[in-house]
Image (tube, grey):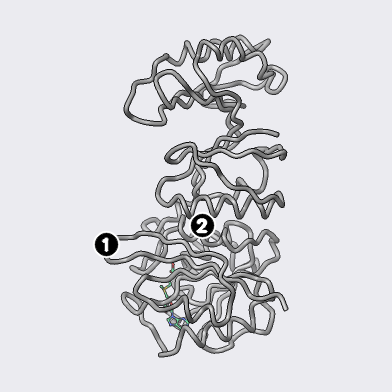
Amino acid sequence: MTEYFVILKGTNKEFATAEFETLFNLYYNQKLKLEQISNVYYKFNTNIKLNYNDEIFKRLTFTKHVGILNYYGNFKDFKNQISNLEISKNYEGKSFAVNASRMFKKFELPNDLRELAAPVYDEFKEGKVSLKKFGIRFHYFYDSPENFYFVSEIYHNSMDYLGRMPKFRPVVMPYTLKSDMARGAINLLNLKNKESVLLDPFCGIGGILLEGYDMGFKILGNDISWNDLKYFKQNFEHYFPDSFKSGQVKRTLADSSTQFLKENSIDGIVSDIPYGKSCRRLGDDLYNDFLKSAKIYLKPGARLVIIYANFLEFRDIAKKYFNEVTEIDHYINKSMTRHILVLENSKE
Ligand SMILES: C[S@@+](CC[C@H](N)C(=O)[O-])C[C@H]1O[C@@H](n2cnc3c(N)ncnc32)[C@H](O)[C@@H]1O
């Protein structure tokens, strides 16, 4: 068994844990529950050896850091026990860095970095320190002036998706979704096969599907507005110049209240449905008709992740056609909370 230390982004811990647990189960076939240490700090145990180039680490959005939790206690005991961690056996030949941080702002760090690096350095036969191009980074995460978690880093989220946030896209619309929300929602679809076709039936300018493409899926964007579909292409070609040419990304102009796709042709649906506020809601029974037809073109056992606003009646209609897996709330401001509803098509 190995114990792992995890730091999540603090914006929505329920969303962040759901994303982590869903992807962990998907890639390692193991159901786990992250155990909260405090605030954004979590841990879990598993017999699986995680590696920095595992697929899961290309997908995570709301996880900032994952490392092996080697030790918890004070510095004096740590120095006596560090040889048990077999640092040289595991990391010899790699240049290393040491970092120290406080888990809470209410105290100062007790030791300086050089003092903290010394016992680690001594464990290597030939230690090479490199603060920028390190092969392995060790962290002292202090939860009090005396005690810390000593962690060897496996994964640090580079958050490349931030470059696709609305303000950086060539085309922006007020209703568009942020790239981190989009990624998190896609990750709840429970899909890993790169041949999977991901549909956003109300794709707008493509805020969600840009992230699906980045994860390697085949993309189908549909909208009732040709204007939006034009911008959709523009956004895709800005970030991924070959996306359309390669045939990985397609778009259709259709009313999503109709059955515009073939039976069992879609592996996952993810959408931020029209709210009727800043974007038009077309068709009175739009939600009902959309869900009814989606049931036909979505494969059995496949999921939909639908984002909708608190002032909409969507969930009850959805449950007429699909099974609910979970629902997560995401606070936006005083007048709006978004719900992220995860649904599954029955298997028969
Ligand atoms: C909330 S916006 C989607 C925003 C999108 N997620 C993004 O990030 O750009 C909803 C979209 O649904 C489209 N829409 C409205 N009614 C529709 C219908 N009946 N069929 C298909 N698309 C529709 C609108 O044109 C609009 O682009």
Q: Residue at x 50, y 70 (%)?
A: 306
Residue 184, numbered circle: 2
Give the x, y percent position of residue 300: 69, 75
Task: Assess whether mark 2 and mark 1 are in contact (beta carbons under 8 angstroms).
Answer: no
Instruction: Point out the image quarter for the N terminus.
Output: top right
Instruction: Answer above or below: position of 5 versus 280.
Output: above
Instruction: Answer above or below: position of 253 versus 307.
Output: below
Residue 290, numbered circle: none
Element type where label 2 sits in the image: helix
Instruction: Point out the image quarter for the C terminus.
Output: bottom right
For discs 1 and 2, the disc positioned in front in the rendered view: 1
- The answer to which of marks 1 and 2 sits earlier in the sequence is 2
**Residue sitting farthest toward the left:** 334
Give the x, y percent position of residue 234: 47, 67
Element type where label 1 sits in the image: loop
Residue 334, numbered circle: 1
